[in-house]
Image: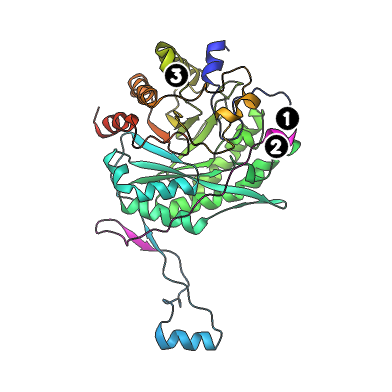
Amino acid sequence: MSKKLTVWLLIPTLLLGSISFGACAQTDEEAAEYQPAAVREPQEPAEPGVESIEEHQAPDATPAETGKEAEEAAVNHQPAKEEEVVIIRPPPTAIAKYKGLWLPFLREVEIALDEIDRLKADGVNTVAIGIRIHRDGQAIKDENEAEIRKAVNEFHKNGIRTCLMLNPAHPEFGISPFSPEACGKPLLDKVTPLALKWAGIAEQYGVEIFCPVNEPQLLSYQNDNDISEWAQEILPELRAVYHGKLAFLVQGGAEGLPAYNITGYDYVAIGGITADSDIDSIPHRTEEKINESLDAIEVAYPGQKCLYFGIAAFTGPDFYWWEPIAPANMSGNNPDLPADFFVVSREGQADYYQVLFQKTWEEVDGYFIGAYKGCEYRDKPAEDIIREWYTTDR
């Protein structure tokens, strides 16, 4: 692989950073950590025209008692009965191109829901929601199921489609990607039950796209064969419970673009595409790097439908403290690059999205722009560029 391509792939994975590693076993100090995220409750019932159905519920379940009946239940130590759960499915309109955002944690989901009208004005038609997972003893568990279900309802109620994926890309996951635990298939196999559970939820709610896991290389570091084997093993099980579109996430890194066997999936979701300071200082290099990325995808996944996932142009000044490409962390993760290499000006952020869309619009099936701390685009010049491309039929 050429040096130029390697530079394009020096992109910020949520945990790995842009560093080139050797064998699987390395020190735990090389893993960063996340902070917990906020949660948001949905607000309104379904609007007319949006299909709603009751979730599977016990035949004798009724709304919780109120008034005197509730008091009597409390005195008799009777548990309150579960409230009816309403599932709001998205409108049945077809999507020609995904014009999406990547919301890796509930903090980002909360912000997006608070600005739902703004998202619609920007032309956003799909959001990808990360489902945090973590180790609990020998098991791997998910978090915030109720909140995510409610968030999916809220997006669907507002006509925005959803994509769901498990997200281990945070240090609170509890396992360093450089440890022996993250070699081979054991972690991937432990994730399988959760992936199938959430694929079933995705089917129930009419979720547009399901992706089993974000950054699978964190669960089987530098082991493309095992990831490929897992992708094929889980595929028929996913198809059995979910009838929407399946994507598989491929995260580029300093080692290059992994070539997994994802035959049978509807999309390859290419992660890690980001701007760097060249957009401000050497603009033509940005065009070259984007062309190189398209060439690399065609070599690794010829003929595969493609989504650009988690595209990011970091402006700062606030980052998640663990962010590998934040200036404060660059000396440890990318010692050969300037500390601010992955930080661009607000104008550079807008220029990057303009060039990216111009070069790739006819080549890919959609975009999920990173909308998390450090790379937010709203209230910046980039919002005008994104709105122009997302709201115009081309």
Total label count?
A: 3
Residue at (34%, 30%) from the top-left corner?
A: 382
Place of residue 220 in the rendered image (x, y in percent of width and height, measured from the top left): 66, 34
Query: Magenta stretch?
Result: 25-54
Q: Nearer the viewer, residue 333 or 153?
A: 333
Read off the residue under disc 2. 182
Place of residue 135 in the rendered image (x, y in percent of width and height, measured from the top left): 67, 49
Residue at (53%, 25%) from the top-left corner?
A: 11
Amino acid of disc 2: Ala
Read off the residue under disc 1. 24
Disc 2 secondary structure class: helix
Which quadrant is home to the C terminus? top left
Q: Residues within 10 Å of mark 2 (few under 14, many from 20)?
A: many
| Labels 1 & 2 near each other (Cβ < 8 A) | yes
Place of residue 41 in the rendered image (x, y in percent of width and height, measured from the top left): 42, 59
Q: Residues within 10 Å of mark 1 (few under 14, many from 20)?
A: some
Q: Name the disc covering residue 65, or none.
A: none
SS majority, magenta: loop
Against 40, residue 266 (above or below) is above
Amino acid of disc 1: Cys
Q: CA distance from mark 3 to mark 2?
A: 29 Å
Residue at (29%, 56%) from the top-left corner?
A: 50
Of labels 1 and 2, earlier in sequence is: 1
Read off the residue under disc 3. 294
Residue 93 part of the magenta-drawn span: no
Against 345, residue 126 (above or below) is below
